[in-house]
Image (spheres, coloured by chain):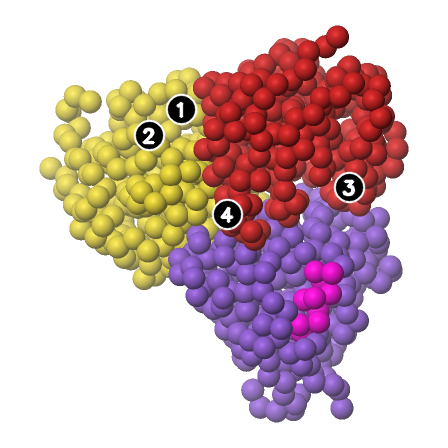
Chain colours: A yellow, B red, C purple
């Protein structure tokens, strides 16, 4: 029987990211590059946005983690993602695929399917995006019309068929490697009212995957880190502008043990009812 | 005689945006995508930046509003704007054209003229940009060398000839549909010292146009919302970094009735002297 | 013997930027456009991001300063930089070259060498980037593996051979025109934990170069302005989100005399040991 993740495991990942400062190669959308870089810096990681095909392959080999985010698939970005993805798989660089807004939009839906076949380490998205990646319909833009619970079986199947850990964000986040299912019950509605939080979470997952071989733990720890920081931020900043600032502050200074303790981890048997 | 806008009308638009969360499709410049998304989220709307020609047409049909902002006309963006503009007109999606920095810069001046002929619902710009769109000279970059009062006659003519509502930002904003003229006297100089405020206002106009058929009201309400939030933000945050944060906070939490009451609305006969 | 820079000289540059509001043409990377614009606005300057080849040449002629930053060399940006650089040299517009992440990445390394030959007014980078521009090896992404002291001789040689002032950022910044060396001892580690600070410093150097013919002074004053604002910001904001906001606030409201007095200027003979 697979091991169950503990609060101490999660805390250990936070500590390790801060101690080692992993270099995270991000090919992400133009709306969120800035906040993504600032989230990684707040976490103690080092961001690098390298998105030209001629540079992306070599960089994905030396980076400690790679994020490909399909939020704006313009110009040379798709080719840079293809090159980086193959290089990451070849070099063993942990690679996170975030299939933003696929389903409703044709160009990125096709690209996401193509990248999935290359073999990402972890897939991170909302419920609609995960459903669309597994072959269903998407939401409207970046909003999800589904819930993590509603796509539980789909996420499990996607994990088993693709070999990737699948992390589904929502009011209660769900992470699965096909053998284990973990829910993260922490979080706050304000996390959906600042642009780039989900996209930045993808980058944070890549940072965490750089410090542990347990990919389920990496995705879970990153999710818990963001969610707990969001809870703490909302306690002092109830409106969106201040909240975005406080979120970075709390990613920066939250105690690792607090991330573990407040994560609201729930492990459940794969066969259990949702 | 056309009806006069009231503070209650303005408050009603704020309430409706928050209640319905319109999906606003933004094709805008790379400098301001992040702040534009955050302004829309603070207002309770849902941003989506979809800027490739193959995706932009279909998305403009399903969105509740469209913004085309000419701040950085790079790569495929001009083609995405053309496709989205035609789709919006065809589908009846309210469409805001923001002709950033035209006049001085040739590429975007030609594109703005081309898009104007397609038939935007609302044109939003500073005085120099509005003058240039109507056939005059522009300013230097995004700064305006003219005032709304100075281009009053030009704005009226542009509204009548194009069929669009024209909103001119400045110390006192001016909005006209060719039959009515409204001034919005609220605002604060700090609004000119944070990047993306004018561009975000264009997106907020599109969000407001999604909840009312009165386009003059939509442009007026969005302008008032931004200006009153700016006044309130400046009262607690006198320097630019904190002001930008407080501006989002106040867009988020300002009471609709306060937006109406503090807007400083002045309706005037079209024939009156400026 | 060349003159020594004084705190009063530095203060005078800050005052002049605020008084004249120089228009700074930025062709910079997509990660930092927003924060770069906000730093310039906080300083009292006027940013304009014009990055298409057809528009960049004419704009570089009328702007008061130009920044070319190689952080993301995508699409038409390299061509826009070439056109703008030649126009700036031809028109006498002060031009800052920031060779972000060269050395490790081939595309931008070649472009940086090409632009250096055109004749920038000032080169600004970290130690690894300056070493790579002078013909050595680079760092990993935007992080520097070298120190300003470690590349002192290289920076002096680069300044003499290229005719550009060379500004090297680090724990203690070093600025040289080949005849004079100035160190700026102010600053704070949090300046490295917010994305875009170094890139924005390049834009601030361009703004300062618009108000004085002494290019060594321009680079020194901009460096001191950013470093002192960072020190003051860190005193009230010890975590990264709040620090980024406070940094803009202090760029906005710091007294010019305080910038000069706290800069930690050290002038040294060119022949002295590091």
Identify the residue under disc 1: A144
Marks 3 and 2 sit apart, C-alpha to C-alpha, by: 44 Å
Same chain for the residues under marks 4 and 2 in the image: no
On screen, residue A134 above or below C93: above
Mark 4 or mark 1, which is nearer to you? 4
Pinpoint the chain carrying mark 2: A
Q: Name the image quarter holding residue B10.
A: top right
Identify the residue under disc 2: A170
Q: Position of residue B102 (x, y in %)?
A: 79, 36
Mark 3 or mark 1, which is nearer to you? 3
Marks 4 and 2 sit apart, C-alpha to C-alpha, by: 34 Å
Magenta-highlighted residues: C10-19
On screen, residue C5 above or below C113: below
Identify the residue under disc 4: B236
Q: Residue A188 lies in magenta, yes or no? A: no
Same chain for the residues under marks 3 and 2 in the image: no
| CA neighbours of label 1 inside 10 A, class few (<14), some (14 to 19), many (20+) | some
Pinpoint the chain carrying mark 4: B
Q: Which residue does the image show at 65% across and 55% down from the upper left?
A: C40
Checking the image for residue B144, the label placed there is 3
Query: Which mark sits nearer the N-terminus, 4 or 3?
Result: 3
Pinpoint the chain carrying mark 1: A
Marks 3 and 1 sit apart, C-alpha to C-alpha, by: 40 Å
Same chain for the residues under marks 4 and 1 in the image: no
What secondary structure is marked by label 1?
A: loop
Same chain for the residues under marks 3 and 1 in the image: no
Q: Are marks 1 and 2 in contact (CB under 8 Å)?
A: yes
Q: Position of residue B76 (x, y in %)?
A: 68, 32
């Amino acid at each position: 029987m697979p091991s169950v993740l503990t609060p101490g495991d999660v805390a250990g990942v936070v500590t390790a990211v801060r101690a080692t400062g992993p270099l995270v190669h991000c090919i992400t959308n133009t709306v969120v590059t800035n906040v993504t870089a600032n989230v990684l810096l707040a976490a103690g990681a080092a961001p690098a946005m390298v998105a030209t095909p001629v540079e992306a392959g070599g960089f994905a080999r030396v980076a400690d983690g790679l994020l490909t985010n399909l939020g704006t698939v313009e110009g040379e970005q798709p080719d840079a993602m293809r090159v980086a993805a193959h290089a990451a798989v070849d070099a063993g660089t942990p690679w996170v695929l975030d299939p933003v807004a696929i389903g409703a939009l044709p160009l990125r839906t096709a690209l996401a399917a193509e990248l999935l076949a290359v073999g990402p380490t972890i897939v991170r998205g909302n419920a609609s995006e995960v459903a669309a990646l597994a072959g269903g319909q998407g939401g409207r833009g970046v909003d999800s019309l589904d819930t993590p619970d509603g796509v539980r079986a789909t996420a499990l199947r996607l994990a088993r068929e693709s070999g990737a850990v699948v992390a589904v964000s929502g009011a209660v986040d769900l992470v699965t490697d096909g053998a284990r299912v973990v829910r993260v019950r922490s979080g706050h509605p304000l996390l959906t009212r600042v642009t780039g939080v989900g996209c930045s979470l993808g980058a944070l997952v890549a940072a965490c995957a750089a410090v542990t071989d347990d990919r389920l733990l990496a995705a879970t720890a990153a999710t818990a880190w963001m969610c707990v920081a969001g809870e703490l931020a909302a306690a002092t900043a109830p409106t969106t502008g201040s909240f975005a600032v406080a979120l970075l502050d709390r990613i920066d200074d939250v105690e690792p043990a607090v991330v573990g303790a407040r994560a609201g981890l729930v492990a459940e048997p794969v066969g259990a009812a949702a």
